[in-house]
Image (cartoon, helix red, strand yellow):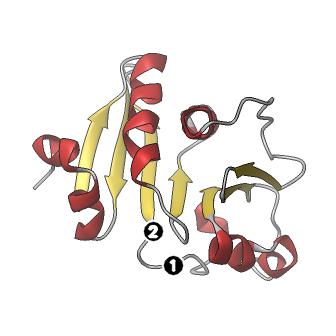
């Protein structure tokens, strides 16, 4: 599945998060890719807010991981930007977090293949003209879970 979503403003990013949040279930992994300032953390915060987090949602850039308990569900937000080696993932507890809940992973390319194949990857980008978009990629099962996105599917 490949779906490109235009993100003309902050509300569009929040709407994308609001579309994805209700279909998430334990063991899901969401990979958030893109250059600095493209909207990864903005999306993660909007997703966490939609899931019910009312407290402050700091960027995990320095802590590397922030975990939120939302009812019976836990969501762990990882930021791997400062990771020096994928072997550090064991210390961060990525596999344990996914076993019990949902993981959001910024800078997933630093995980060097340690993320599950059946993840949903969101590639945020800003074009030369300043327009923003997000390319969603994942197994076709994600498309059946996100039926509203079918109309935006890419060939």
Q: Position of residue 140 (x, y in %)?
A: 23, 68
Q: Which residue is mark 1?
A: 116
Q: In the rendering, at what x and y percent does residue 123 appear?
A: 44, 49
Residues tagged 1 and 2 counted as in contact (Cβ below 8 A): yes
Residue that appears at 57% across and 42% down: 35
60 or 113, which lies in front?
60
In this rendering, the answer to whether 34 lies above or below 29 is above
Residue 142 visible here: yes
Q: Residue at x 29, y 71 (%)?
A: 139
Q: From the viewer's side, name the closer residue of 7 and 21.
A: 21
User: Residue 47 sits in which quadrant?
Assistant: top right
The C terminus lies in which quarter of the figure? bottom left
Q: Which residue is rendered at x = 27% and y = 51% of the image?
A: 146
Mark 1 residue crowding within 10 angstroms, few (<14) / some (14–19) / many (20+): some
For label 2, the crowd category at 10 Å Cα-Cα, with few meaning under 14, some 14 to 19 and many 20 or more, is some
Residue 111 at least partly seen: no
Left or right relative to 1: residue 151: left
Q: Residue at x 33, y 65 (%)?
A: 138
Q: Give above or below for 112 relative to 11.
A: below
* CA separation in Å, label 1 and label 2: 6 Å
In this view, the residue in front, 52 or 127, is 52
Q: Is residue 134 above or below residue 10?
A: below
Q: Looking at the rendered structure, which numbered label has been put on residue 119? A: 2
Q: Quadrant of residue 12?
A: top left
Secondary structure category for the residue under label 2: loop
Q: Is residue 8 above or below residue 78?
A: above
């Amino acid at each position: 599945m490949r779906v490109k979503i235009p993100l003309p403003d902050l509300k569009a990013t929040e709407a994308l998060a609001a579309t994805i949040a209700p279909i998430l279930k334990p063991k899901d992994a969401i990979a958030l890719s893109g250059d600095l300032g493209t909207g990864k953390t903005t999306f993660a915060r909007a997703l966490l807010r939609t899931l019910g987090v009312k407290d402050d949602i700091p960027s995990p850039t320095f802590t590397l991981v922030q975990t939120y308990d939302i009812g019976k569900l836990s969501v762990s937000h990882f930021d791997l930007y400062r990771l020096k080696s994928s072997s550090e993932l064991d210390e961060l507890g990525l596999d344990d977090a996914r076993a019990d809940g949902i993981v959001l992973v910024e800078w997933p390319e630093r995980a060097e293949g340690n993320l599950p194949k059946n993840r949903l990857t969101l590639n945020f980008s800003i074009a030369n003209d300043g327009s923003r978009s997000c390319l969603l990629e994942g197994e076709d099962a994600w498309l059946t879970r996100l039926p509203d996105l079918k109309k935006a599917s890419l060939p």
